[in-house]
Amino acid sequence: MRLSRYFLPVLKETPSEAQIASHRLMLRAGMIKQQSAGIYSWLPLGYRVLRRIEQIVHEEQARAGHIAMLMPTIQSADLWRESGRYDAYGPEMLRIRDRHDRDMLFGPTNEEMITDIFRSHVSSYRDLPMTLYHIQWKFRDEVRPRFGVMRGREFLMKDGYNFDLTYEDAMHAYNRHLVSYLRTYERMGLQAIPMRAESGPIGGDDTHEFLVLAETGESEVFYDSEITELTFGARRIDYDDHAQCRAVLEEFTSRYARTDDTHDEAEFEAQVPQERRRRARGIEVGQIFYFGTKYSEPMGATVVDPDGNRVPVHMGSHGIGVSRLLGAIIEASHDDRGIIWPEGVTPFHVGIVNLKQGDEAADLACEQLYAAVTEAGLEPLYDDTDERAGAKFATMDLIGLPWRITVGPRGLKNGVVELTSRRTGESEEMPPDQAVTRLAQIYAGKL
Amino acid sequence: MRLSRYFLPVLKETPSEAQIASHRLMLRAGMIKQQSAGIYSWLPLGYRVLRRIEQIVHEEQARAGHIAMLMPTIQSADLWRESGRYDAYGPEMLRIRDRHDRDMLFGPTNEEMITDIFRSHVSSYRDLPMTLYHIQWKFRDEVRPRFGVMRGREFLMKDGYNFDLTYEDAMHAYNRHLVSYLRTYERMGLQAIPMRAESGPIGGDDTHEFLVLAETGESEVFYDSEITELTFGARRIDYDDHAQCRAVLEEFTSRYARTDDTHDEAEFEAQVPQERRRRARGIEVGQIFYFGTKYSEPMGATVVDPDGNRVPVHMGSHGIGVSRLLGAIIEASHDDRGIIWPEGVTPFHVGIVNLKQGDEAADLACEQLYAAVTEAGLEPLYDDTDERAGAKFATMDLIGLPWRITVGPRGLKNGVVELTSRRTGESEEMPPDQAVTRLAQIYAGKL
């Protein structure tokens, strides 16, 4: 993309309404625009990151054997009356009456609808196990939306639902989701720690939240510091293997790690030596639940089991806060000058800065780099505007592309350009083609 | 994908509520499930096609230099009061009151919001031309939703908006959209004819609708039969070249082609020799508008022009009915046995039918084919269930994958499998690796 043809409305001033870094930086970098309280437009740069995050979620869901579909945003109130949640949900539910005076709502979650789909089409244990998911916009009418996309009213969520014949199979689905979420977050450059939590309006006994540690997090968390040393890494997992998934769950959840809902100070002190006890704040970026037959029983989602009996299926639901993740990633990865995108989610893979637009050699070298980077399967953002070098650097730093190539007449005389890491600030001079090769190596396996 | 692990709830009976072929077939093929009147869930197979169509739209928009972003579904009523459309829009607008008693609505289109974004961030002619688009769910509270996804209430639309300094530039944007839409529809295997139409609630003088001819179309259309001989084909277009785009527009719109809104019988008879006059029905799959300063003037979307004057920008909007396209494609491409997907949008590229599940040689050959097809960058759907061969064929015909490989013990003894075209029904025996090579050739350039 050439910046002269792009729509990147960066702001010089820090918007006064934004209280936390991610909100400030998303506004300043021209990623979002508030349309109403807690409702945002995703400007082109923000939309690109949103799509990359969505793509990673899709890929990891497919890897775990989960099946993508899409449910609508508007739901009938009748479905929610079947589960009893229509009255129970409270004022966060956006209730709507259509032109025929039917009660509708903008879905805050989809347990009822997916259960309805299941009961309409599945009747035998032979079709199990099954996990369906979608990535769809949700609405929760927060009384006080804040922190930008971190606590918006309209937000994008991946929610998945497993259907299993037995408790044991459903717990495997639970473990499998935990494994796939660990992979998912790590690909985004995040450490998200599974912590025991409370289930809230979804229901059920077993639930873990995934939290990214950040000073601006809304939840208080308590954990054993050893947990932060765990990484999922490149290990290979057979998602059908119950024991393998169970082992990962045990590895990542056996140490003390809880949100304030479930925190027990006495237990914390008994289990964790003082020097490893941590109190911090965290941003919730996902949650997994097992809730058994809470929905299948009242809604009649049953299958015939191998003995010929009709039994309600065991279910769980599993969510990733897709739009909120942008905020979480920025909270975890920024500095005074702006955002620092992890390679896995960056909106463009490299920025090309032309120090002297209009200089024949510089323009030509930039065009050649642009073509070579594209040819390597990467997406460059080329600042081909007439701005001063300082302003170009400031914009690149603000929008946080992890790598920058700087091209100027002086370097070109020596046959070199400069490759700079946004994270470390370190620069290295090298011939243009070597810079492209280096970028291809950096991104290999990260896309 | 292995069918034994997929969720493909095909129906044996024809659902009685469905009046037209596409609606019937989408229900029978397990692509959609109605959740409320005019509101559908996209089951896994339907979702796959929806995503492919979306992807083609994104690619062709990028090719034309248009910039992707995303606006929210819920909008503030205040924006629509600025343009005067809040009161004018009528009962098709889904009006909502939030918990703070603010008037909101589920967006049926986005002229106001995009104009608001533009005026907040752009102030100089130097930033023009600019075309922004998004693909987002819309809601129109139709009094009588029908024909499945063809006239639903919640539907997916691509809507794009151009901002230009002059009338001439805006007309180039109009022409450019026409060109890019021709390409877009052809990649989906559709012939969509641009016809002069009326602008309706969007406003403006210049507008063309794109119609796919089909008996079940809701619009009556009148055209010169020569039009159906035009194809865009593989021609290369420079989307910045005003003359080139203009020439395509002239080629495709100079012959008589109108919807009943603008039809003029006397003109029709004067312009078109009798033997070329056609009256038919069509499905609207897109529309382009030029409406000048209709929104920019009341909403204050102005730029400073080269002479230093503040002038309202010239705008147009351009829509593609993404979810509706599935219905249109099926209406245009099906037979008694089911859907026939064009290669460009098929949910899976090839079906693999194992005639004797459990037979060692057949199972092994299928697994090897599955791996080889995947390796070739294509997605197979492998029917690995215990169903009879007849039932497997019926399902494959119903869901409409354009190619099928049939694997059975008898053929394998001679080292061959069978490659069958869904469209022609013709089969050819060949060694498995040759079938994979053939598929790769068929799909080359179509993905």
Image: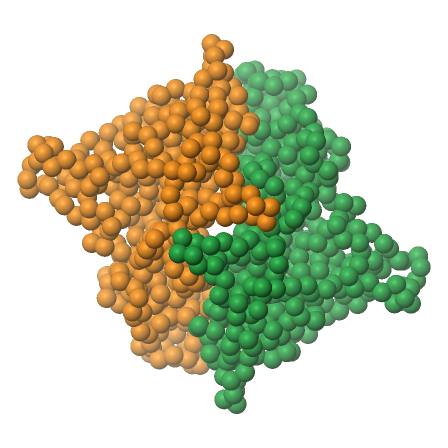
Chain colours: A orange, B green
- Looking at the image, residue A55 sits to the left or right of residue A230; the answer is right
Q: Position of residue B212 (x, y in %)?
A: 73, 52
B12 versus A26 height, above or below:
above
Q: Residue furthest left?
A: A274
- Looking at the image, residue A121 sits to the left or right of residue A248; the answer is right
Quarter-of-image position of residue A226: top left
Q: Position of residue B400 (x, y in %)?
A: 66, 35
Q: Residue furthest top?
A: A307
Residue drawn 55% across the image and 79% down it = B312
Is residue B199 in sight in this rendering? yes
Label tally = 0
Q: Position of residue A268 (x, y in %)?
A: 12, 35
Residue drawn 70% across the image and 70% down it = B206
Residue drawn 30% across the image and 64% down it = A18
A432 versus A155 height, above or below:
below
Residue drawn 68% across the image and 63% down it = B200
Quarter-of-image position of residue B399: top right
Quarter-of-image position of residue A236: top left
Of residue B158 and residue B142, the one placed in the foreground of this image is: B142
- Looking at the image, residue A146 sits to the left or right of residue B123; the answer is left
Of residue B398 and residue B385, the one placed in the foreground of this image is: B398
Q: Position of residue A186 (x, y in %)?
A: 31, 45
Q: Residue furthest right?
A: B274
